[in-house]
Image: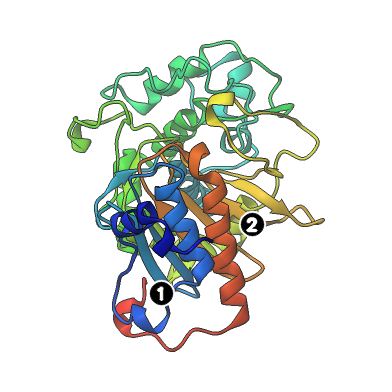
């Protein structure tokens, strides 16, 4: 890279970026240069106002960094990164025997009939249920104050676009039906289930569900949260969730999901299917989809070795099973514009962690 001394504009840009490493003891484990450069590129070249990042392994914070103008502790809407959390919550009910991945939804939701009643929860969570994709934004156009049961009924009343289990079509309102199943099986509202089964056990105190087109509405009054895009959270909170996922369903000794549930969530569900990814989602090339998360890399066994759940607003959480490294990037910027830089930062973090063991961390650095 040309020296900044010969390019005054780059000097100004570097001052504007103000890349910092935050958190106790962070000076002992600075991010690798390639990671820092990728974060800088998101602001300087990709147009992101700011980006905050956490990288972890074994429940410990390796480093925390930010570039540009962003408060890393401010709760932000994370768009499609919500899907991973929604699927995990639903899988807690599968663990408890209240729901089954492979039984028809009509068994649990009597208000749904016809073809839609034969769809399974597995198909809903893998977007292979035939409910269509992002076209029309059927779930996003719904009001925030109807029930999830009514949301599901409206979505299920529309004729299927494909035979269930035959086509992967990303971004339909299928998760609203899955959420209605969860409420019906548990007798509790989605917000209650999230608080009891995910947020409180993991210490996600700054996270809540809402409707992304009605952020001004008090979350307590949102009875129809959008499950594929309505989570509002922080980098630290999402990091705790990822720690649980990476830890085989437990964090800090607290079991949230079974190992079997994690295995199901990280198994490729779309092998051999036609993959329809809408242009507006602009996702990079993926191996396919699992349950609530993308399978970026897959082993011959069908198990995903790199899983993620990118959001349209730039949030990018990921877990790399080969190295045990996981992390999350949060921002408010269009994901397609930063996707390349995000991959570079992630790969730099994985490569650096694989070369050396970080020094012992203070108790304040632990995310559990």
Q: Is residue 222 left or right of residue 260?
A: left
Q: Residue at coordinates 44% horizontally, 49% vertically from top-left? A: 42
The quarter of the displayed image where residue 8 is located? bottom left
Q: Nearer the viewer, mark 1 or mark 2?
A: 2
Residue at point 77% right, 40% down? 271
Q: Residues within 10 Å of mark 2 (few under 14, many from 20)?
A: many
Image quadrant where one finds the N terminus? bottom right
Side of 34 relative to 72 (left or right) = right
In-front residue for pair 139/213: 213
Judging by the rendered image, the residue that carries numbered circle 2 is: 306
Residue receiving disc 1 = 252
Counting every numbered tag in the picture gives 2
Q: Residue 139 vs residue 15: left or right?
A: right
For the view shown, which residue lies furthest in the bottom direction? 360
- Residue 304, given in percent of the width and then of the height, sits at 68, 55
Q: Position of residue 104 (x, y in %)?
A: 61, 30
Q: Is residue 323 above or below residue 111?
A: below
Q: How many angstroms separate mark 1 from mark 2 (CA)? A: 23 Å
Q: Of helix, strand and loop, which one carries label 1?
A: loop
Q: Are marks 1 and 2 in contact (CB under 8 Å)?
A: no
């Amino acid at each position: 890279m040309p020296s900044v001394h010969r390019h005054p504009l780059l000097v100004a840009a570097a001052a504007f970026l103000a890349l910092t490493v935050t958190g106790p003891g962070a000076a002992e484990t600075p991010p690798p240069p390639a990671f820092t450069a990728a974060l800088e590129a998101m602001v300087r070249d990709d147009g992101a106002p700011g980006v905050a990042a956490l990288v972890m392994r074994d429940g410990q914070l390796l480093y925390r960094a930010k570039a540009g103008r962003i408060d890393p502790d401010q709760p932000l809407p994370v768009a499609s990164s919500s899907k991973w959390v929604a699927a995990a919550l639903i899988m807690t009910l599968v663990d408890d025997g209240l729901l089954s991945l492979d039984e028809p939804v009509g068994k649990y939701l009597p208000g749904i009939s016809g073809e839609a009643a034969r769809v399974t929860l597995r198909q809903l969570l893998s977007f292979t249920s035939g409910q269509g994709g992002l076209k029309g934004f059927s779930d996003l156009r719904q009001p925030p104050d109807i029930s999830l049961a009514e949301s599901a009924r409206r979505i299920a009343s529309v004729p299927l676009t494909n035979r269930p289990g035959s086509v992967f079509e990303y971004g339909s309102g299928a998760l609203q039906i899955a959420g209605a199943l969860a409420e019906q099986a548990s007798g509790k509202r989605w917000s209650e289930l999230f608080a009891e089964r995910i947020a409180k056990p993991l210490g996600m105190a700054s996270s809540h569900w809402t409707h992304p087109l009605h952020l001004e509405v008090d979350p307590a009054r949102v009875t129809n949260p959008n499950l594929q895009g309505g989570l509002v959270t922080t980098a630290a909170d999402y990091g705790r969730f990822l720690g649980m996922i990476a830890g085989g369903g437990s964090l800090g000794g607290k079991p949230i999901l079974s190992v079997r549930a994690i295995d199901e969530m990280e198994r490729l569900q779309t092998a051999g299917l036609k993959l329809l990814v809408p242009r507006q989602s602009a996702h990079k090339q993926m191996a396919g989809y699992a349950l609530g998360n993308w399978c970026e890399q897959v082993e011959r066994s069908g198990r995903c070795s790199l899983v993620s759940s990118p959001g349209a607003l730039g949030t990018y959480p990921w877990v790399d099973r080969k190295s045990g490294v996981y992390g999350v990037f949060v921002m408010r910027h269009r994901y397609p514009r930063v996707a390349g830089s995000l991959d570079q930062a992630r790969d730099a973090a994985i490569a650096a962690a694989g070369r050396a063991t970080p020094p012992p961390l203070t108790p304040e650095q632990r995310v559990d």
